[in-house]
Image (cartoon, grey):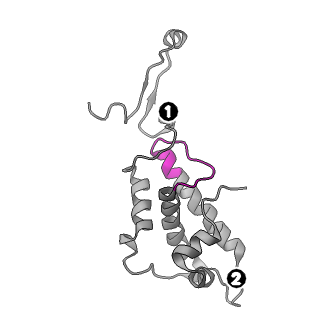
């Protein structure tokens, strides 16, 4: 099963149950749980990709409120742009905490309390010299390590 940082309770707390239900109803006014979960999975994957790009190892689950808020920002963008229910984003959405958290994670402008994964981040260079590995000092360079140079 795909990772999911959001729950119905979490989404309802920030958006309201009526909004969530309106976003995921089909033409017959039937609430589509599968569509809701699909958007949850997609928004979690979106944030996990951004976390990976920033040089961290994304968790499979989280209680980190900043990451969950950013995931909610992705969720709103995806939920409001579904082909069967296209809506304009809420007024001043770009100024909301969920949108700002989303933007900060996507840009990599935030330091997260997650394990670093420097050799997988874009712009990193990994070089393993067999002799250096034997002595325990493999040279690993990343954009973060050489930022001040």
Residue at 60%, 64% (x, y): give it: 6
Tell me where the magenta segment starts and ends, as one range.
49-64
Residue beneath label 2, please? 31
Instruction: Indicate left or right for 138 with 45 as reference.
Output: left
Query: Is residue 137 placed above or below 43 in the rendered structure?
Result: above
Q: In this view, does 24 lie above or below 38?
A: below
Q: Quadrant of the C terminus?
A: top left
Label total for image: 2
Disc with the residue nearer the chain's start (2 vs 1)? 2
Mark-to-mark CA distance, 2 and 1 = 43 Å
Q: Residue 19: within the magenta?
A: no
Magenta portion: prevailing SS class: loop
Q: What residue do we see at 64% from left, 59% from top?
A: 4
Name the residue rendered at 64%, 71% in the picture: 8
**Few, some or many C-alpha atoms within 10 Å of disc 2 (few <14, some 14-19, many ≥20)?**
some
Q: Residue at x 59, y 53 (%)?
A: 62
71 in relation to 78, above or below = above
Q: Is residue 104 visible?
A: yes
- Residue 34's image quarter? bottom right
Q: Residue 119 carries which label?
A: 1
């Amino acid at each position: 099963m795909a990772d999911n940082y959001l729950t119905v309770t979490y989404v309802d707390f920030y958006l309201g149950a009526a909004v969530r239900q309106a976003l995921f109803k089909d033409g017959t006014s039937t609430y589509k749980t599968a569509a809701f979960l699909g958007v949850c999975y997609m928004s979690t994957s979106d944030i996990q990709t951004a976390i990976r790009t920033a040089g961290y190892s994304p968790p499979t689950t989280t209680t980190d409120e900043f990451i969950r808020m950013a995931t909610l920002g992705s969720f709103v963008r995806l939920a409001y742009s579904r082909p069967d229910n296209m809506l304009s984003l809420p007024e001043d959405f770009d100024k909301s905490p969920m949108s700002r958290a989303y933007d900060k994670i996507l840009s990599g402008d935030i330091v997260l309390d997650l394990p670093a994964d420097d050799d997988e981040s874009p712009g990193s260079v990994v070089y393993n010299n067999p002799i250096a590995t034997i002595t325990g000092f493999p040279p690993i360079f990343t954009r973060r390590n050489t930022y001040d140079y």
